[in-house]
């Protein structure tokens, strides 16, 4: 099997990987399309130093084998975190924080940058027939953006800023739009902000009075420091960025100004699929590469890069 394998130091293309065999409760999925996430790039920088295996976690595929016969032959997308169902986090409904979770392409579980993958069947979601594969590929990052709505109140009285003008920020804006919220995007690149213009107010300079909620979506370690300068006293920062390395925070400022900082990552797939299928969430076309050209995909500076798999 062909795939992109992380050996602990770098990503390598291999054509000798064994075709995966599903464990009990898992399904075998033939990958149709997979997308590169910034987290994949951070793995190359040391974000997951213990991981060894096939990379990738954003995919659309066809189920070839499954304990759920109704899924066989169906196009699907899938969640990241395989859980035990027994630990304190699973017992209290915090499944994505399972003490022994396995994470696609990141921790103790091969991902989707290969021709085939296995995944816990309960993590799969069918793709509606009217939703093309190249649009369904955005389900996972959009779901992560929808997680914000489960964590903080976004009533109409609160002004919201999204800090960042890249893919992560775009996903957040699309989720907000699908929920009927207009936000302000604060960025650094006029050419990138132009992509947001139909869906949000955009600016290169933050509002002097600040914002009640700041969604930090820069993908940079310095983003949280910028967010602290933007958020109002007793306001909330939603931290979406994940990256290798550490950053020092002025915790006295956080305490004195009574700032709430909310970490936010994986989110609900159902509203994301619905938003994509209904057209409430709109995304640019993904740029596709062959697996052999994985380095170009990882270095791509456009909106979104991915891999399209042949039918052979």
Image: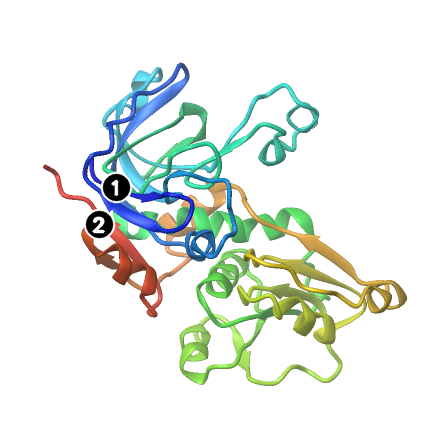
104 horizontally vs 286: left or right: right
Badge 1 or badge 2: first in the primary sequence? 1
| Residue 31 image offset from top left, x and y in percent | 26, 38
Cα–Cα gap, marks 1 and 2? 7 Å
| Image mark for residue 89 | none
**Model colouring:** rainbow
31 and 170: which one is in front?
31
Q: Residue at x 46, y 78 (%)?
A: 193
Q: Residue at x 54, y 71 (%)?
A: 164
Relative vertical location of residue 273 with respect to residue 68 in this rendering, above or below: below
Q: Quadrant of residue 230?
A: bottom right
In the image, residue 127 sits, relative to residue 277, either above or below, namely above
Q: Quadrant of the N terminus?
A: top left
Identify the element where label 1 is drawn. Answer: strand
Residue 3, label in figure: 1
Q: Is residue 286 visible?
A: no
Q: Nearer the viewer, residue 70 or 64?
A: 64
Let me know if residue 20 appears in the view.
yes
Q: Residues within 10 Å of mark 2 (few under 14, many from 20)?
A: many
Q: Which residue is mark 2?
A: 291
Could you tell me which quadrant the C terminus lies in? top left
Does residue 164 appear left or right of residue 68 in this picture? right
Q: Position of residue 206 (x, y in %)?
A: 65, 81
Residue 62 x, y percent position in the rendering: 25, 33
At x 28% / y 59%, what residue is drawn? 295
Looking at the rendered structure, the secondary structure element under dot 2 is: helix
* Residue occupying the far right of the picture: 256
Tell me if label 1 and label 2 are in contact, CB under 8 Å: yes
Q: Residues within 10 Å of mark 1 (few under 14, many from 20)?
A: many
């Amino acid at each position: 099997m062909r795939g992109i394998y992380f050996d602990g130091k770098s990503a390598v293309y291999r054509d000798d990987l064994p075709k995966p065999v599903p464990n009990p409760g898992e399904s075998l999925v033939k990958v149709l399309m997979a997308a590169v996430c910034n987290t994949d790039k951070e793995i190359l920088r040391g974000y997951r130093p213990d991981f060894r295996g096939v990379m990738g976690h954003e995919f659309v595929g066809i189920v070839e084998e499954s304990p759920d016969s109704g899924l066989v032959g169906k196009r699907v997308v899938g969640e990241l975190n395989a859980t035990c169902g027994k630990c304190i986090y699973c017992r209290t409904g915090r499944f994505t924080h399972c003490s022994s979770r396995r994470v696609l392409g990141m921790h103790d579980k091969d991902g989707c940058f290969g021709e085939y993958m296995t995944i816990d069947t309960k993590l799969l979601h069918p793709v509606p027939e009217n939703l093309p594969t190249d649009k369904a590929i955005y389900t996972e990052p959009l779901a992560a953006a929808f997680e914000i709505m489960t964590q903080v109140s976004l009533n109409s009285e609160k002004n919201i800023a999204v800090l960042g003008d890249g893919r992560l920020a775009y996903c957040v804006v699309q989720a907000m739009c699908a929920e009927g919220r207009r936000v302000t995007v604060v960025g650094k690149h006029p050419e990138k902000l132009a992509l947001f213009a139909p869906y949000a107010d955009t600016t290169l300079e933050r509002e002097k009075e600040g914002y009640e909620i700041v969604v930090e979506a820069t993908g940079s370690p310095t983003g949280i420091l910028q967010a602290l300068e933007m958020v109002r006293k007793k306001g909330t920062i939603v931290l979406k960025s994940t990256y290798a390395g550490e950053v020092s925070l002025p915790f006295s400022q956080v305490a004195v100004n009574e700032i709430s900082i909310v970490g936010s990552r994986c989110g609900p797939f159902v509203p994301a699929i619905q938003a994509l299928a209904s057209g409430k969430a709109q995304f640019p076309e993904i740029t596709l590469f062959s697996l052999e050209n994985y380095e170009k995909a990882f270095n791509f500076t456009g909106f979104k890069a991915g891999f399209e798999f042949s039918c052979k």
